[in-house]
Structure formats: structure tokens, C-alpha cells
Amino acid sequence: MPSRGSSPGRGAGFVTYTWDCVPPKHKATGYLAGPIHGLDCHVGGRTKPCEKLLIGEHAECPGCASQKPIDWCGYVPLRANDGRPVCVIIRRAVFDVVNAIKPGSSVMWGRDDDQFGAVWVIEHTNNHPWSRWWPDRKPNDSMCEWLAKFWQRPHLVPYLRTHFDNEVALPLREVEKLPDATSAPPRVTQQWVRGVQDAGAKAEGLADFDAVTARLKQSAGKLKPSRNGTHPKE
């Protein structure tokens, strides 16, 4: 259909999705618009990321304060057949199947009869190719800004960009050096180790970055596991 006037702009500057909670016996078709955005979240009630795992042990995490359980969740960017950006949340049970689907593929998503059953996403070949509707747009959605808005946690945007897109270094505000024996050990995440490496190298004037990195990794590897019931990531 031809149009007149200007084409739609970017609006908020990022794609805004509609969360499909996928009720029982619900099915829909469309396209996989990008990679799964997976991270460890507090579940039981409204799902939100564990900020201690995302940022570091010194982060203030409402989920940890409420002692909510943690489980992996995958946020999947989709396009419905009518073009609407849609997001569904998957769990680890269906990760391997969804992860094998190439972005841009035609897909179907849904949930079976059980309201507690897992949301699934499978390939579905009854649609036109992605390029039929979006010839100039790659199926490589980044959901960082929208997820922070969806969770009502806008300060998480730079951490999500690091976690998903590797765009920026984490601005670790409180963890600048390895803890001494009397302080509580932070969770050893990859982001934490990288932040300590950068801080240590800067403190020594970048005289021997490789030596500083090796020593800090060795020290970080000796830290005890977190005491909140989960083990630190390698």
C-alpha cells in the first residue's frame, strides 16, 4: 500500500515490545527478531533480574532483599505477523530448541494446556521470509533499553549492554580492589573480575598489564563462594 508524508520515526529510540504472557492453549506466529536475551532472575511474582549477579555483590537487589528464588530466564524478541514487536519469556527447559533457531526465521510460539507449562518457540515455515517485510533491517534486536523500562529499573541499561552486547565496561562504583580478609567477598562474576583487572592495572600505571591481570585472576580464584545459597560464576 502506498503512503504519503514522512515515514515513522524511531520514537523512543529503541524498539518497544508487547509482552505476550502466553496463556494456556495460546499460539501465535511471526518471526524471531534477534537472539535470546538470557540472564538469572528472581522469580515468584514479577520476574526481575538479580542485580547482585548482574552488577556485583555490593548492588542493592530488591529480589535478594525479599529472598526470592533465582532461575534463568530468556527474553525472546519476536515480530508478530502483523508487524508488532512482541516478547515472550522462556525457561531453561526449552532453551536448546529456541537457541537453534536462526534469527529472521518464521516461528510459532505458545503454551500447552497447563498454565504452569513452559512457553515454547519452534520454527514455522508458513510465512514469507523476513526480508519480505524488513529488507533493510537485520533480525538482531537489542532489548537492553526496553528491558530496563519493562522492569522499571532504568539504571540497569549500561549493565545490560555489557551483559548482552559487550558495548561498555561496567561502572563498578563500590568494588575497586580485592577485599581483605575481614570484608564480605563479592560474587566472582566475569564483569567483577574484569573491573578489578582494569582498576589494578590503572593503579600500577599500566606498567605490566599482563602480569597484573594474571595475579588478580589468581587472587580472585581463591575467593570463597557467596553465602546466599548459589555458587559464583566462573
Image (tube, rainbow, N blue to C red):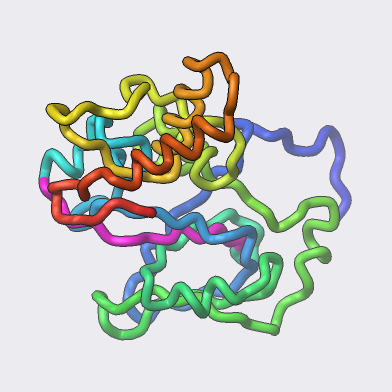
Q: Is residue 25 left or right of residue 5?
A: left
Q: Main secondary structure of the magenta part?
A: strand
Kindly indicate the quadrant of the structure image that contains residue 116.
bottom left
Position in image of residue 83 (x %, y %): 65, 58
Q: Quadrant of the C terminus?
A: bottom left
Q: Which residues are magenta?
A: 67-79
Estimate the x, y position of residue 193 in percent, counting from the top left. Answer: 42, 38
Q: Is residue 136 left or right of residue 205?
A: right
Q: Nearer the viewer, residue 208 or 19?
A: 208
In the rendered structure, the answer to whether residue 74 lies left or right of residue 29 reads: left
Q: How many marks?
A: 0
Q: Residue 176 falls in which quadrant of the image?
A: top left
Q: Residue at x 53, y 30 (%)?
A: 169
Dividing the picture into quarters, in which one does residue 183 lie? Answer: top left
77 and 85: which is toward the camera: 77
**Residue 12 rendering spot, x and y as whole percentages:** 59, 31
| Placement of 203 over or under 102, stated as above or below | above
* Residue 197 x, y percent position in the rendering: 47, 31
Q: Is residue 202 covered in magenta? A: no
Name which residue lies at 72% across and 77% down: 127
Task: Please check the rendered image and state whether residue 69 is part of the magenta-colored stretch, yes or no.
Answer: yes
In the image, 106 versus 225, the foreground residue is 225
Q: Residue at x 50, y 55 (%)?
A: 37
In the image shown, does 118 or 207 lie closer to the viewer?
Answer: 207
Image: 154 above or below 113:
above
